[in-house]
Image: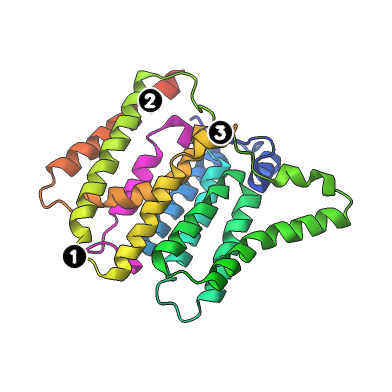
Amino acid sequence: MNAPLVITNTNDGVFSMILKNYFSALPQTPLFVLYHVLILVQAIRLNMVLSDLRMFQSTNYTTAMAYVLLSGMLPQWCNISPALIANFLLIWLFIKLSRLYNHPSPKNLLFNTGLIVGMSVVCYHPTAILILVVLFALAVVRPFKLPEWLILLMGILVPYYFLASWLFLTDNLKTFSTYLPYLQLNIPLTQWSIPLVVSLSVLLIVLLAGLYYWQISNKRMVIQIRKNWGVMMVMLLILLPIPFIFLHAGIESALMSLVPLAAFAGNTFSYPRRLVLPNILFWLSVLVIIYNNWLFIKN
């Protein structure tokens, strides 16, 4: 049995330091169990959130199934990485954003939302792109009010304020720059292979089918659910370019886009009345996963 690898990057945030110091030396069996527990907990949690928000016409577990299924599409995603841990924060952030519409006390909620984003950036630097997510989401969900935007920005900055204070008191303020994300355009993959192209193609087809069925059902949704799907669309569009704009983040950082991907893929597997297309896409995905794992075991 080949256990998932523990992937960490230098100066990538607190999550990388924790994984490197406490998990990289674990035996294979605990790592194998840990990876699957993380995936299953995230899949079930995301499915529960979308069901509670009534974002689908009926209660089902297609989002959880899609999350588990799509997590095995790329070999780089089948590892324990900071991006995988960050998905817990991403799901938590979506819960906060979904409550913004007509919330009676939006200032407290906005500060807590900004606090989650600031903590996420400290823990995993590529999550800095979530700042754009919450700004666009706030613009989509609520009318513009300058105090609300300032409170959100204050929440984002608070974790760095306390971090700078702690570094100053411990005479380590010169290391503050290591806790800041570093942006640089790059190509995360130097070589393209046929299995990779096939995997990305199947992912794209599943996503496009999900967007198509979501667009059909979106007309019959109430305004609040439309707003929530709008936030999910913002997440998808902003999270996809992460591997291309954060140096050394790697293709594994794209795992963060799995949250909105699985949400839209849930439409692919639950909306059609005829199950021909969902069955075809499901078994195509399974075949891709089997082939990728066969190559992994063979090598």
Which numbered disc flags the more N-terminal residue, 3 or 2? 3
Q: CA distance from mark 3 to mark 2?
A: 19 Å
Left or right: residue 145 compared with residue 49: right
In the image, 126 versus 22, the foreground residue is 126
Q: Which mark is residue 66?
A: none
* 103 to 62, vertically: above or below: below
Tag 1: amino acid: Arg
Judge depth for marks 3 and 2 and give the one in front. 2
Q: Position of residue 234 (x, y in %)?
A: 40, 53
Q: Residue at x 60, y 38 (%)?
A: 183
Question: Is 75 within the magenta?
Answer: yes
Q: Is 76 contained in the magenta span? A: yes
Which residue is labeled 3 in the image? 5
Residue 223 visible? The answer is yes
Q: Which residue is mark 1?
A: 220
What's the mark number on residue 196? 2
Comes first in the chain, label 2 or label 1: 2
- In the rendered view, does 281 fall on the left or right side of 173? left
Q: Position of residue 282 (x, y in %)?
A: 24, 40
CA–CA distance in space, label 1 to label 3: 44 Å
Instruction: Give percent across and percent down for residue 25.
Output: 67, 36
**Circle 2: residue type:** Leu
Residue positioned 82% across, 53% down in the render: 167
- Which tag is nearer the camera, tag 2 or tag 1? 1
Q: Amino acid at mark 3?
A: Leu
Residue 86, above or below 1: below
Mark 2 and mark 1: span between their CA atoms?
37 Å
Q: Secondary structure at mark 3?
A: loop
Looking at the picture, does residue 148 appear above or below residue 256?
A: below
Q: Which residues are magenta?
A: 50-77
